[in-house]
């Protein structure tokens, strides 16, 4: 049977449709689960067969499905449900974010890399005969001059084109009154080109065109690796965030539901929020009674009860039935936006971190330039020809050019991030790995980090679970879903009606049954009832089902492993004291604080930092976002909110908390490799620079030494150990 | 030795051709879906009418 549209109407998602210039409509979907040729064929064939779909193309590397539609009459919701029945869950991808991701910088880098590669090879081709001449092979002066001119014709334009990235960056840095790694590179390359050119004109012996271009080629490899690392992490992080849809469902005057972009919501708009969806903006409840899960906002694990006229904060999850709300603030003025501003302030404080390579450059630049200057001045003073002295100074600049340094750190970090990516850790930047390696204190949030963040059934007999399961499977409430999960596959109750904020009612084997709050089943309420629901057949005894927020299975092991590595562990939570104490005792953390507001959390981080600690914050909620941004390094689970993932350096894409320990191990190992590479580069310079000063370096030696040192550094980078 | 004047520029020209080819692959975004390209060669073409029936069988 061919897949057709689902007749049932889902939420309207026409906000994701995008008009192209050719009058076509495009829709981008993020498809999960596609892995092989069979998946591609199946998805593209079935999609193209749907009425209204003109073209379908799946990108297997990114999981994005690009659909071309005829007219705007096709409902994206039905395409998604058709895909789901094929076995591939899909989510609409935010077109705005997709368009913004054109990778201009990457294209420029790779073009420069291609040109530098071409220049290095072809200039080298003309250099080999010149080198042969250096070793007393037969080479007439006229031929040598011709070879040098050809080398110049190929090498100089390529070096100038490929070096633009470095020249521009060096110029910017100089204008800001600093010297980064690009300054010695630029000075070296430009001086080398000028001297080589004058030597060619004057029929001299030393022309370094090949050295200048191959230097740029090797450096561009390092630059490009660094860029690929960041671009890959950015797009993967973007995919995670796209899963949290940026639209709100508004009700117009005629009572029709329409999806509108979040930014277009005005105060006074009537909004609908489906069960399980997030409240889009701060809004007041119109009617009925709502049960809101604020755990991502405040860390509180028990749901909050809201009555008509009261405020529902943006970011809370609707745990009751369909809600009708009236918007009170625009998206930018909502609680979410206020927290985002706190995050920005924190992120700025972290951007002051100086990367390893830049710290090395700050030491390196003045030394190298002083040595080159001393070579020129000293050589001239000691009776050398000024031309010869200048050539020696240039040889010093070339041979000490931070080729190994430029490659040392990016190569290590790319290898480390690739290892971590396979183990379910997304590293957002190379600097994040460097900071992670310095950590000595780890702060955990409780809800959603140490715990699963969703209810788990406790202490119920399997007969009761099996009895209540048919009704639970028919409900979307988190506790009912937890019950259904515990029961597994099975029959469904019939004639089900869901009473928002109360429970569900339906027929199981012809008997009327109810599942829900104590009051809904007519049981006199005794305890606080937010972590329990009741089940019973009509006129029969009622049973209580209790839930807790389940601990992650590897939480205790993770904390033990962190302590074994000499780190201190602390829990900062916004939840109630009882809940936090229980978790802290189970996982073995003596140092914990409960009931904290978002500002108190970030203040606590600031105090630790002021005390000289390097803090790693692990959190998922909006209440953690500010603390995440302030900490020295930050980790967020993949289930975290957009704001928290933005604020974090690393995102865990898997379920295991143990990945944090692996990430720290790999980061420390990567740091060791990077420092070893620096050590090697320093050693190399200690030998090479004096050799260049006394005039032992000729273009052949320079070419050998440079590629040799880069090779050693790259091989060392491959030794980064993956975590156990 | 005059042959060098011919061979030198010719080899540079060949190198330029290679760079041009590489730039062309970049422009036509051939590196956007490397995994997909590797898998796509395994997909059979839908030229004969029978294949759609096979496709249905695969979808079930």
Image (cartoon, rainbow, N blue to C red):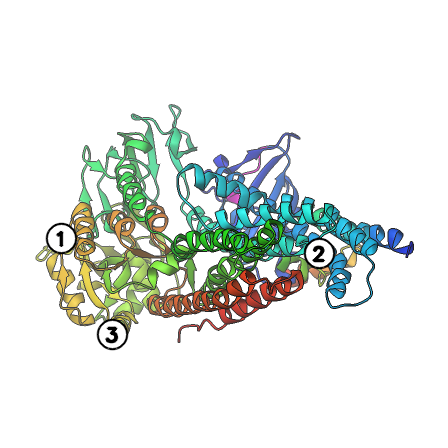
Q: Is residue A21 above or below residue A623?
A: above
Specify whether residue A75 is painted magenta. yes
Q: Nearer the viewer, residue A701 or B34?
A: A701
The residue pinned by badge 2 equals A205
Q: Is residue A528 above or below residue A55?
A: below
The reply to whether label 1 and label 3 mark residues of one chain is yes
Residue at figure coordinates x 79%, y 67% from the top left: A137
Q: Nearer the viewer, residue A363 or A28?
A: A363
The residue pinned by badge 1 equals A595
Q: Secondary structure at mark 2?
A: loop
In three-dimensional space, the C-alpha distance between marks 2 and 3, rounded to whole angstroms, equals 65 Å
The reply to whether label 2 and label 3 mark residues of one chain is yes
In three-dimensional space, the C-alpha distance between marks 1 and 3, rounded to whole angstroms, equals 25 Å
The residue pinned by badge 3 equals A560
Tell me which segment is drawn in magenta: A72-78
Q: Is residue A559 above or below residue A434?
A: below
Image quadrant in which the C terminus of chain A is located: bottom left
């Amino acid at each position: 049977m061919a897949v057709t549209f689902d007749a049932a109407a889902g939420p309207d998602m026409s906000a994701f449709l995008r008009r192209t210039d050719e009058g076509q409509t495009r829709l981008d979907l993020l498809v999960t689960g596609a892995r092989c040729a069979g998946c591609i064929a199946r998805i593209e064939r079935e999609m193209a067969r749907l009425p209204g779909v003109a073209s379908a193309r799946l990108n297997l590397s990114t999981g994005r499905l690009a659909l071309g539609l005829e007219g705007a009459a096709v409902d994206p919701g039905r395409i998604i449900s058709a895909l789901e029945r094929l076995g591939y869950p899909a989510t609409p991808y935010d077109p705005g974010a997709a368009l913004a991701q054109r990778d201009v910088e990457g294209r420029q880098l790779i073009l420069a890399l291609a040109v530098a590669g071409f220049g290095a090879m072809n200039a080298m081709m003309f250099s080999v005969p010149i080198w042969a001449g250096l070793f007393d092979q037969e080479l007439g002066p006229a031929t040598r001059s011709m070879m040098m001119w050809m080398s110049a014709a190929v090498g100089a334009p390529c070096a100038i084109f490929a070096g633009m990235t470095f020249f521009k960056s060096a110029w910017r840095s100089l204008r800001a009154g600093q010297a980064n790694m690009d300054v010695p590179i630029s000075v070296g390359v430009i001086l080398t080109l000028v001297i080589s050119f004058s030597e060619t004109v004057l029929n001299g012996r030393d022309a370094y065109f090949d050295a200048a271009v191959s230097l740029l080629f090797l450096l561009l490899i390092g630059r490009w690796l660094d860029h690929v690392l960041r671009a890959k992490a950015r797009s993967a992080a973007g995919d995670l965030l796209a899963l949290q849809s940026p639209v709100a469902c508004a009700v117009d005057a005629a009572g029709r539901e329409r999806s509108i972009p979040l930014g277009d919501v005005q105060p006074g708009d009537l909004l609908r929020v489906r069960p399980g969806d997030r409240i889009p903006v701060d809004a007041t409840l119109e009617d009925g009674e709502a049960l809101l899960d604020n755990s991502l906002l405040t860390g509180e694990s028990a749901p909050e009860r809201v009555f008509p006229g009261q405020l529902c904060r943006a970011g809370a999850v609707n745990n009751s039935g369909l809600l009708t709300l009236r918007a009170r603030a625009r998206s930018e003025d909502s609680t979410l936006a206020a927290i985002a501003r706190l995050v920005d302030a924190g992120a700025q404080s972290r951007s002051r971190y100086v990367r390893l390579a830049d710290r090395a450059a700050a030491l390196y630049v003045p030394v190298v330039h002083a040595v080159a200057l001393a070579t020129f001045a000293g050589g001239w003073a000691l009776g050398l020809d000024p031309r010869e002295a200048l050539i020696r100074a240039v040889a010093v600049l070339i041979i000490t050019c931070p080729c190994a340094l430029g490659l040392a750190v990016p190569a290590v970090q790319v290898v480390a991030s690739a290892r971590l990516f396979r183990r379910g850790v997304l590293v957002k930047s190379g600097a994040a790995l460097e900071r992670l390696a310095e950590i000595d204190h780890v702060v955990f949030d409780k809800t959603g980090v140490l715990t699963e963040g969703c209810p788990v059934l406790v202490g119920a007999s399997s007969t009761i679970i099996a009895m209540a399961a048919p009704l639970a499977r028919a409900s979307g409430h988190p506790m009912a879903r937890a019950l259904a999960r515990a029961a597994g596959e099975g029959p469904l109750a019939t004639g089900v009606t869901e009473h928002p904020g109360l429970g569900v009612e339906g027929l199981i084997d012809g008997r009327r049954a109810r599942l829900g709050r104590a009051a809904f089943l007519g049981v006199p309420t005794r305890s606080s009832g937010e972590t329990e629901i009741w089940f019973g057949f009509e006129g029969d005894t009622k049973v209580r089902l209790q839930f807790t927020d389940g601990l992650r299975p590897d939480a205790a092991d993770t904390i033990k492993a962190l302590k074994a590595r000499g780190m201190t562990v602390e829990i900062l939570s916004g939840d109630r004291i009882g809940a936090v104490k229980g978790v802290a005792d189970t996982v073995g953390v003596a140092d914990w604080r409960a009931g904290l507001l978002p500002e108190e959390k970030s203040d606590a981080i600031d105090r630790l930092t002021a005390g000289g600690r390097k803090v790693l914050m692990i959190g998922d909620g909006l209440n953690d976002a500010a603390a995440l941004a302030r900490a020295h390094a930050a980790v967020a689970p993949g289930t975290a909110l957009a704001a928290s993932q933005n604020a974090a350096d690393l995102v865990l894409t898997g379920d295991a908390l143990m990945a944090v320990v692996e990430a720290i191990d790999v980061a420390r190992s990567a740091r060791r490799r990077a420092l070893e590479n620096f050590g090697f580069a320093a050693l190399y310079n200690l030998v090479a620079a004096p050799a260049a000063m006394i005039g032992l370096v000729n273009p052949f030696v320079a070419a050998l030494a440079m590629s040799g040192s880069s090779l050693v550094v790259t091989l060392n980078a491959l030794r980064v150990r993956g975590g156990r | 030795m005059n042959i060098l004047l011919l061979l030198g520029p010719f080899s540079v020209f060949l190198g330029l051709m290679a760079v041009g080819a590489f730039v062309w692959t970049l422009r036509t975004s051939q590196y956007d879906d490397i995994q997909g390209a590797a898998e796509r060669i395994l997909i059979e073409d839908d030229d004969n009418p029978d294949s759609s029936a096979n496709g249905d069988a695969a979808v079930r």
